[in-house]
Image (cartoon, rainbow, N blue to C red):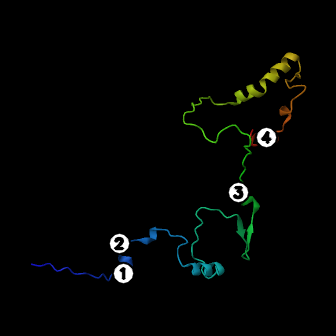
Amino acid sequence: MFNIIRRGISTSTVAAGKHNFRKFLLYNKRGTRIFKKLRAANPDQYPDMPVDKRGVRDTGVTTADGRYVEIAAKIPELIVPNLEGCKFKPYVSYRAPDVIQSEFTSQDLYNAIYAQKVIDDFKSGALEEDGSPKAPSAEETLSPEEAWTRARKTGS
């Protein structure tokens, strides 16, 4: 007639439960602050404890004797141009018209830089018999390495 409500106690082990906490990676969360300080002072006693750096790369290396040596080439350098006196605003309005421009090809680059000089040299007779200019400009005398370096400079 009457239902009696009883409380039950489970005696099963934790591993037999429904929760699997191995899939939750909790890096750097194990232990108290005191334990972490002890581990930092004696890393050889706790070698298997994982340290998660959240994607941050080291800027140096640890030597065999345990010293940390900074490598200047691994330190990121931010190159920011001087925008003093720049009339442009730091944003673009959504109402700005779309710019439709064709691909800038090597032929377009040649026409923009060298074509007029070649035409002028041809009309004035300032070309050698092989077609090279008698008085080349500074851009025409660049080595391939120097041209490659100039093309990759900021503002080129």
Q: Residue at x 77, y 23 (%)?
A: 115
The amino acid at mark 3 is Pro
Alpha carbons under labels 3 and 1: distance apart? 50 Å
**Which residue matches tag 1?**
13
**Which residue matches tag 3?**
76
Question: Comparing marks 4 and 3, which lies closer to the viewer?
Answer: 3
Q: Residue 6's spot in the image, x, y percent?
A: 22, 81
Disc 2 element = loop
**Within-10-Å neighbours for mark 1: few <14, some 14–19, many 20+:** few
Alpha carbons under labels 4 and 3: distance apart? 22 Å
Q: Is residue 41 above or below residue 110?
A: below
**Which residue matches tag 4?**
150
**Nearest the eye: 129 or 82:** 82
**Which residue matches tag 2?**
18
The amino acid at mark 2 is Lys
The amino acid at mark 1 is Thr
Q: Is residue 63 above or below residue 42?
A: above
Disc 3 element = loop
**Nearest the eye: 14 or 30:** 30
Can you say which quadrant of the picture contains the N terminus?
A: bottom left
